[in-house]
Amino acid sequence: MNLNQITVPSLDLTKSIPFYEKLGLKLIIKALPHYARFECPNGNATFSIHQTNKLPKGDGVYVYFECENLDEHVENIKRNGIEFDQEPTDQSWLWREARLKDLDGNQLILFYGGENRLNPPWRIKN
């Protein structure tokens, strides 16, 4: 089994689409007003947004996008006018992360985990 896509809710796709394009995602399906899908620049995963009349309560959705050159990627995104809640920071779980929210409050984490993404020292041994 392989993960195909993640879909997050949005109140207004016409505003959300340009936001995600500024992050570096490529728009491949635009079925307004209800749905849009993006291709991630690396790998085979896709990311979708769907129109909703009401956003979920609580912290919303957390979506992680892995970036090989995290700091450089964050600087490029900031030049596109996107603001981050947290600049790239080394984390205790051995990843480097930058955090921001999309226009609907979904939590987006750009990170680099390297070998520790799948094989941290605390990984369960088979």
Image (cartoon, helix red, strand yellow):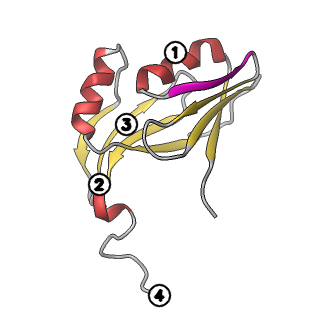
SS at mark 4? loop
Proximity of marks 2 and 4: CB atoms separated by less than 8 Å: no
SS at mark 1? helix
Identify the amino acid type marked 3.
Arg
Q: Which residue is mark 1?
A: 18
Q: Which residue is mark 3?
A: 99
SS at mark 2? loop
Q: CA distance from mark 1 to mark 4?
A: 44 Å
**10 Å neighbourhood of mark 1: few (<14), some, or many (≥20)?**
few
Return the x and y of residue 118 as percentages of the image width and height: 39, 66
Does residue 54 belong to the magenta stretch? no
Return the x and y of residue 90 as percentages of the image width and height: 22, 50
Identify the amino acid type marked 4.
Asn
The residue sitting at 35% across, 70% down in the picture is: 119
Q: CA distance from mark 2 to mark 4?
A: 23 Å
Does residue 49 appear to the left or right of 68 in the view shown?
A: right
User: Which mark is in front, 2 or 1?
Assistant: 1
The residue sitting at 69% across, 35% down in the picture is: 56
Does residue 25 appear to the left or right of 95 in the view shown?
A: right
Q: Earlier in the sequence, mark 1 or mark 3?
A: 1
The residue sitting at 28% across, 16% down in the picture is: 79
Q: Which residue is mark 4?
A: 126
* Helix, strand or loop for the magenta stretch, by majority: strand
